[in-house]
Amino acid sequence: MFRAVLTGLLLIASSSVLALQFPVEMIEGVEGARVVVNINKEDLDKEVRWTPFESAPPVTVTDALGIVRTHLAKNPTLKDATLQEIQLRRIPHHENNWHYMVMVQTMREGNPVLHYYVVLMSGKLFTAIREPESYK
């Protein structure tokens, strides 16, 4: 009896562990820097597919910039950020999944600081992180 209960508890616990999904890590080159963003697999599975040349992207450049602007407005230290670059890119290993990579710059103590964002075609925004130079 004890063995059956223990086996049942182990099965329940292991199914919970197996249900845990690890994020998909994207590493991209931006202006010579390696930028990393973690996206939940669930978000990629729900992601809007887009095929270039067949239609306009579901999220336009203007939409993506508006999403980033809204995010920046929520953080006082980012309110004076200036756009440095925006690129439309394919999500690696996902043929019809595209995103915008947005790079903005702020100033901190007189020094430029770059901030990176990924905007999916669903309109969801993710903060990306530049890898430290020591990892190159």
Image: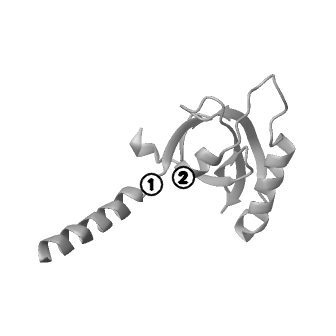
Question: Residue 110: x percent and y percent?
Answer: 68, 58
The residue furthest bottom is 2
Q: For this rendering, which residue is in front, 93 or 77?
A: 93
- How many angstroms separate mark 1 from mark 2 (CA)? 8 Å
Specify whether 4 is left or right of 86. left
For residue 121, above or below residue 16: above
The residue nearer to you, when weighing 77 against 96, is 96
Residue drawn at (73%, 63%), measured in percent from left and top? Answer: 78
- Could you tell me which quadrant the C terminus lies in? top left
The label on residue 6 is: none
Report whether residue 10 is seen: yes
Q: Could you say where residue 96 lies in the image, as x and y percent from the top left?
A: 66, 31
State if disc 2 and disc 1 touch (CB < 8 Å): yes
Badge 2: residue crowd in 10 Å (few <14, some 14–19, many ≥20): few
Residue 69 in picture, x, y percent from top left = 80, 57
Question: Which residue in the rendered view is the most extreme toward the top?
Answer: 53
Give residue 21's mark.
1
Residue kind at label 1, given as amino acid type: Gln
Q: Which secondary structure lies at badge 1?
A: loop
Q: Quadrant of residue 108?
A: bottom right
The residue located at (68%, 54%) in the rendering is: 125
User: Residue drawn at (58%, 33%), measured in percent from left and top?
Assistant: 94
The type of residue carrying mark 2 is: Asn
Q: Choose between 15 and 134: the one closer to the eye.
A: 15
Residue at image location 49% in from the left, 46% down from the top: 24
Mark before the other along the chain sequence, 1 or 2: 1
Q: Is residue 86 left or right of residue 16?
A: right
Q: Which residue is mark 2?
A: 40
**Where in the figure is residue 61, as x and y percent of width and height?**
83, 41
In the rendered image, the quadrant that contains the N terminus is: bottom left
